[in-house]
């Protein structure tokens, strides 16, 4: 493992002020590793000068490459485009905002050298984030792991190292709705963690809709990797049917033995609302699965690349 190539995949969108500080720290880390490398920026078409800033940096460093999507496919697709087009023996996915310190890459590589196929970065704490966001992140993966058939390490994001073996297995997965961290967990092989402190964001604010994006990825984690919600709904339906039969029997017996008893209707309206809401919920649950089946059956590209500048003379 003395000679190897490292690919660093960086999904970006409207990050013109974050490119320079990210490269300053990341390039130093990679130079200390002493390996061949490529830094692939996977760009959702932006409204600022992110494209121009990356292009300028490519002039001074031939190891920087740029994938530009044909339209905005969002972060999951941008990440996958970079991973599937990298050429390294190992690939590290990291955000450009420096909340995930590039210095941790050294530890990820060291663990890989010990024989691990996947090394994920696991947060010890999260600086500069609200209590609401911390609470959501604290509970989200625990809920996903409870409902999903694939266990995703808690307190992790896409920041991780995967080797070529894992990349090629991910390439075989045809699903349209891509949930990178779930796909990596599904592949399996030998995995371990590196613990780190997540820093506050340095440049501006995130241009990706992080909170809604986390909800979307959470849904993908549940619906793409588990049928447990349908199983639970089936059990709930059976329970409600049995409960309804029991109420009907009790009502029949009550009318039979107490025919003059005053009828009570006070609980009828809440019961109608409950059953109506449950029907809507179950319909939505089925819709989530059907939507994903529909997307996969169409067989459309998961992303379309407008430009792939490899920054070489080839």
Image: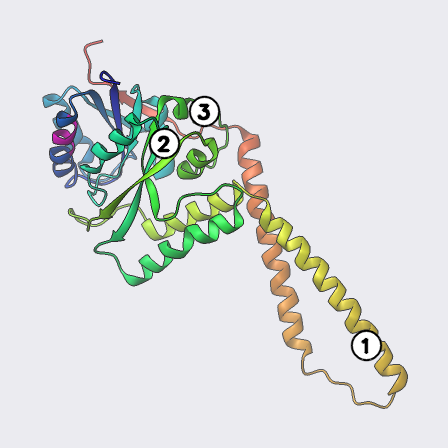
- Whether residue 27 is in magenta: the answer is yes
State the residue in front, 16 or 171.
171
Q: CA distance from mark 1 to mark 3?
A: 58 Å
Looking at the rendering, the stretch of residues picked out in magenta corresponds to: 26-30
Q: Which residue is mark 3?
A: 169
Q: CA distance from mark 1 to mark 2?
A: 59 Å
- Seen in the picture, residue 76 relative to 154 is either above or below; the reply is above
Image coordinates of residue 69 in percent, x first then y, are 32, 29
Q: Which residue is mark 1?
A: 250
- At 41% across and 56% down in the image, what residue appears? 139
Q: Which residue is mark 2?
A: 118
> Taking the image as drawn, is residue 279 in sight?
yes
**Magenta stretch secondary structure, dominant:** helix
Image coordinates of residue 218 in percent, x first then y, are 44, 48
- Which mark is in front, 1 or 2? 2
The quadrant in which residue 158 appears is top left
Is the C-beta separation of discs 2 and 3 under 8 Å? no
Q: Tag on residue 77?
A: none
> Which mark is first along the chain, 3 or 1?
3
Near mark 3 (Cα within 10 A), the count class, few <14, some 14-19 or many ≥20, is some
Image coordinates of residue 305 in percent, x first then y, are 34, 25
């Amino acid at each position: 493992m003395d000679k190897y190539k490292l690919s660093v995949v960086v999904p970006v969108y409207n990050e013109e002020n974050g490119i320079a500080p990210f490269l300053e720290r990341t390039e130093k880390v990679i130079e200390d590793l002493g390996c061949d490398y490529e830094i692939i920026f996977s760009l959702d078409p932006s409204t600022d000068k992110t494209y121009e800033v990356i292009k300028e940096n490519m002039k001074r460093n031939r190891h920087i490459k740029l994938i530009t999507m044909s339209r905005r496919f969002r972060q999951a697709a941008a990440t996958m485009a970079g991973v599937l087009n990298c050429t390294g023996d190992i690939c590290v996915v990291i955000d450009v905002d420096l909340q995930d310190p590039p210095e941790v890459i050294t530890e990820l590589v060291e663990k890989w050298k010990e024989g691990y196929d996947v090394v994920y970065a696991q947060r010890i704490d999260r600086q500069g984030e609200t209590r609401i966001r911390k609470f959501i992140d604290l509970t989200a993966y625990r809920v996903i792991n409870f409902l999903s058939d694939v266990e995703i390490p808690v307190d992790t994001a896409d920041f991780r190292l995967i080797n070529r073996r894992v990349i090629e297995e991910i390439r075989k997965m045809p699903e349209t709705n891509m949930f990178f961290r779930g796909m990596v967990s599904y592949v399996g092989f030998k995995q371990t963690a590196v613990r780190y402190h997540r820093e506050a964001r340095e440049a501006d604010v995130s241009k990706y809709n992080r909170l809604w994006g986390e909800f979307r990825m959470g849904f993908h984690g549940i619906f793409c990797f588990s049928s447990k919600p349908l199983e639970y709904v089936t059990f709930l339906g059976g329970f409600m049917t049995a409960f309804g039969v029991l109420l009907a029997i009790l009502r029949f017996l009550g009318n039979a033995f107490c025919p003059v008893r005053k009828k009570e209707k006070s609980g009828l309206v809440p019961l109608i609302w409950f059953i109506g809401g449950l029907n809507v919920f179950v319909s939505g649950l089925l819709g989530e699965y059907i939507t994903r089946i529909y997307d996969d059956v169409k067989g459309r590209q998961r992303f379309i690349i407008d430009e792939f500048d490899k920054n070489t003379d080839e």
